[in-house]
Image: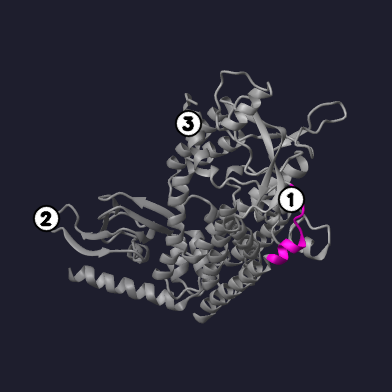
């Protein structure tokens, strides 16, 4: 493959910057994916909820402490 | 009326002069027109249009934070939130009104998609992949091939990934969400009584749950346990550099947790809530996240408008510390920004006094008998200092000394009428007796200093 146009080279650089992250948040559910799979990962959801609660509490404390 | 005046002042360029704004606008239009004529896609037209504004917007933003302190930070933060919300809103418009397809980031005219197009006879051999993102997508059916309309035509519409769909990445969503969360917390540190900001903060906390969960699955659950398919695209140009993605089938693939269903998150259609409860009817991810951003952006805007009522210049606050917040806001609207180069004579001894100044940046020398043998430096003034007030209080309105910018100088100019109102505490918009006394005392001290010298 050879890139001859300047625009194509720019596009190629931009593409390379993002391609490793590129992932479509679209499309259907996979066959067989359902409630059981979410229940298997429910600890992740609880961990995230805990993290957000702790972060929120620290931020609220810092905001109100000044006053 | 006051809030409109405040907003008008805040949203206008104060630090950047009109010529720079005009040149930037000219360059921006030039790049925009060139991009349109070259047949570039919408995201590149938007990028070329916005790019020249970035440096002066940053310069102006820093100036605003320096002059209006925390309210300016909240204002700039609000503008960014509106921009973010606009992207989500545009994606929903593409989806609902432009027959859009969500395949984000949009397929790129890369080598694989380029070769697929050649194999399908959709484009000529001999060209090369351009790496443009597609603007249009032909809708794929369950078999991964194009859905045909009643007349046998392909059903196509916008690639529903907003204007800058290339940034529609989980990490970008998460980073932006966290900037919103911590940025709002920083604003609340200064405006802790602002109920609107607390509402935005609560919405951001909930939104963080969604993005932290989705991003965790995206990066840390890589085991491919689910059978599925991946859509295969072919890409080719339709006009100028505008490309279309043409579905050419599906290939079997093993999918990880994110790809299999984690990508829908907690509350969107097909997400955790629907899976665990059996309930069907939640909005799709694009609509849900537009809704989340609406509940964040609206209170943020209201919170800013609430604080903008008392938008006040901090240098005026330094010079006239006894004025009320409302009076300082009024004065902040009435003043004009002035800039001088090093060596500029701002005030000339003997001239008629028509205004006075408060320094916001730089320094100025007060000189007696400038240009004469008896020339003498009386004082050097800095940020927050008032000068030019003596002439306004003198009966003959004559300047008593010259003031020269010792380096680049930025000032706020207060006209004679406004200054007279500041000195007269019995009538007008400013009724601070303390301020009136402070000014008169300052004038007496300075007059005594001039006589001594």
Find residue B304 and report its image quarter.
bottom right
Instruction: Name the residue at 65% across, 70% down.
Output: A43
Q: How far, Cα to Cα, is label 3 from label 1?
A: 36 Å
* Residue nearer the viewer, B442 or B254: B254
Give the label on residue B386, or none.
none
Location of residue B448 in the rendering, given as x and y in whole percent from the top left corner: 24, 73
Q: Nearer the N terminus, badge 3 or badge 1?
A: 3
Q: x, y percentage for residue B390?
A: 33, 65
Check if residue A36 falls in the magenta segment. yes
Q: Which residue is mark 2?
A: B373
Crowding near the residue tagged with mark 3, few <14, some 14–19, many ≥20 C-alpha atoms within 10 Å:
some
Q: CA distance from mark 2 to mark 1?
A: 91 Å
Height in image: B222 above or below A49? above
Residue B277 position within the rendered picture, expressed as x and y whole percent measured from the top left: 81, 65
Numbered disc 3: secondary structure: helix
Q: Are marks 2 and 1 in contact (CB under 8 Å)?
A: no
Provide the residue designation for mark 1: A30
Q: Is residue B411 located in the magenta-colored stretch of the structure?
A: no
Boundaries of the magenta span: A28-40
- Tell me if mark 2 has few (under 14), some (14-19) or many (20+) residues whose alpha carbon lies within 10 angstroms of its own: few
Residue sitting at x 56%, y 27%: B129
**Figure check: B240 above or below B324:** above
Do discs 3 and 2 belong to a common subunit?
no
Q: Is residue A44 left or right of residue B324?
A: right
Write down the chain letter for disc 3: A
Residue at figure coordinates x 35%, y 60% from the top left? B397
**Which residue is disc 3 drawn over?**
A9
Secondary structure at badge 2 equals loop
B178 versus B448 height, above or below: above
| Tags 3 and 1 on a common chain | yes
Residue nearest the observer in this picture, B310 or B394: B310
| Farthest residue, direction left | B373
């Amino acid at each position: 493959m050879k890139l001859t146009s300047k625009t194509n080279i720019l596009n190629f650089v931009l593409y390379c910057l993002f391609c490793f992250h590129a992932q479509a948040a679209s499309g259907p559910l996979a066959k067989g994916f359902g409630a059981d799979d979410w229940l298997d990962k429910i600890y992740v959801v609880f961990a995230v909820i805990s993290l957000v609660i702790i972060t929120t509490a620290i931020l609220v404390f810092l905001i109100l402490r000044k006053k | 009326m006051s809030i409109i005046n405040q907003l008008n002042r805040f949203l206008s360029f104060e630090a950047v002069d009109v010529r720079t704004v005009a040149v930037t606008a000219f360059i921006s239009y030039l790049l925009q027109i060139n991009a349109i004529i070259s047949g570039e896609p919408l995201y590149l037209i938007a990028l070329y249009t916005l790019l020249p504004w970035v440096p002066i917007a940053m310069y102006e933003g820093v100036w605003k934070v320096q002059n209006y302190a925390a309210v300016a930070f909240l204002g700039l933060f609000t503008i960014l939130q509106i921009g973010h919300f606009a992207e989500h809103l545009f994606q929903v418009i593409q989806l609902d009104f432009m027959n859009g397809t969500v395949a984000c980031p949009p397929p790129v005219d890369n080598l694989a998609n380029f070769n697929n197009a050649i194999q399908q006879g959709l484009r000529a051999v001999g060209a090369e992949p351009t790496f443009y993102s597609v603007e249009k997508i032909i809708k794929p059916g369950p078999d991964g091939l194009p859905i045909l309309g009643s007349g046998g035509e392909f059903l196509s519409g916008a690639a529903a990934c907003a204007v800058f769909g290339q940034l529609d990445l989980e990490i970008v969503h998460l980073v932006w969400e966290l900037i919103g969360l911590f940025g709002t917390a920083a604003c609340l540190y200064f405006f802790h009584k602002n109920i609107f900001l607390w509402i935005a903060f609560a919405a951001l906390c909930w939104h963080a749950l969604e993005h932290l969960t989705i991003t965790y699955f995206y990066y840390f659950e890589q085991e491919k346990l689910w059978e599925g398919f991946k859509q295969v695209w072919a890409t080719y140009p339709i006009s100028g550099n505008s490309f279309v993605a043409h579905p050419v089938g599906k290939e079997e693939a093993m999918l990880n947790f994110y790809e299999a269903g984690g990508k829908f998150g907690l509350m969107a259609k097909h997400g955790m809530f629907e899976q665990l409860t059996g309930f069907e009817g939640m909005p799709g991810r694009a609509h849900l996240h537009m809704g989340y951003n609406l509940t964040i952006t609206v209170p943020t805007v209201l919170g800013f408008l609430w604080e903008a009522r008392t938008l006040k210049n901090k240098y005026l606050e330094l010079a006239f510390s006894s004025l009320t917040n409302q009076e300082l806001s009024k004065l902040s609207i009435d003043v004009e920004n002035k800039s001088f180069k090093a060596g500029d004579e701002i005030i000339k001894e003997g001239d008629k006094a028509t205004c006075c100044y408060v320094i916001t940046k730089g320094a100025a020398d007060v000189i007696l008998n400038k240009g004469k043998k008896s020339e003498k430096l009386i004082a050097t003034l800095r940020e927050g200092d008032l000068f030019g007030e003596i002439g306004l209080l003198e009966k003959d309105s004559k300047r008593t000394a010259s003031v020269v910018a010792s380096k680049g100088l930025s000032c706020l100019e207060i006209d004679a009428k406004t200054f007279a109102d500041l000195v007269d505490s019995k009538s007008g918009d400013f009724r601070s007796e303390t301020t009136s006394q402070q000014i008169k005392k300052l004038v007496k001290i300075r007059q005594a200093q001039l006589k001594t010298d």
